[in-house]
Image (cartoon, rainbow, N blue to C red):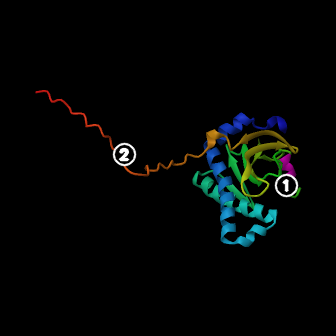
Amino acid sequence: MIDELLSRQDAEAILAPHLGALRGFLEQGWVDWHESVAAAPMLATSRATTRANMVYDRITFHAEAYFDAQNIPAVRKGQMLTVSLDDGRLILRFKKFRSRKLGTAGIPTQQRLEFELQQVVLDGTAATYIVAGYLPDELGIGLDVLAIACTYDGRVIWQIDLRDEGLAPVLPVRVDQPQGPPVRSTRPAAREEVEG
């Protein structure tokens, strides 16, 4: 099935209207986690699995609301959210990456193995399965990786870096008024000559 996978360029064309939003879901899920820890400091001692589950829940909460508003199919089966783009040709999931190699962890269920080997065919259409994911830094304070990865049999076929500067959200710029005493010129103001 590897020969039927969408190329990075084709996938990027499908994802283009949503890349900024995908980055936003991942970042907001992480921010939501930190806000939860600030509100309940005992969460700071949670296991990494607990943190990953909470971040996932927040990421998919934001993603599901966004894709529902866009009338794009986002289906929850059990705890997993999948988003179907381009009439099912591109299937998106959200996960935490294990490392910078962009692999993911999970129980090797039949469904997971089919996804990893890109073997799921729906209604005769071969789909390309991708993961939008994040990787926390070593201290668990920030995020080292925000990316979309297409893997086949445990290796990355292509990836899209969501930290690309072209995807950065537009933020308002605060302009402070100058501080200190007003400065006035000691020169007399120029007089306009009146022609009469």
Identify which residue, 58 or 63, lies in the foreground: 58
Describe the element under mark 2 as helix, strand or loop: loop
Residue 12, how many percent across, how many down? 68, 38
Quadrant for residue 153, please give it: top right
Q: Residues within 10 Å of mark 1 (few under 14, many from 20)?
A: few
Q: Which amino acid does the dot numbered 1 rest on?
A: Ala
Query: Which residue lies most toward the front here?
Result: 186
**Mark sitting on residue 194:** none
Image spot of residue 115 (x, y percent)? 82, 49
Question: Would you say residue 79 sits in the magenta stretch?
Answer: no
- Return the residue at label 2: 183
The quarter of the picture where residue 87 lies is: top right
Q: Is residue 37 placed above or below 129 in the rendered structure?
A: below
* Magenta highlight range: 112-116
Q: Residue furthest top?
A: 195
Vertical position of residue 4 compared to residue 47: above or below: above
| Residue labelled with disc 1 | 105
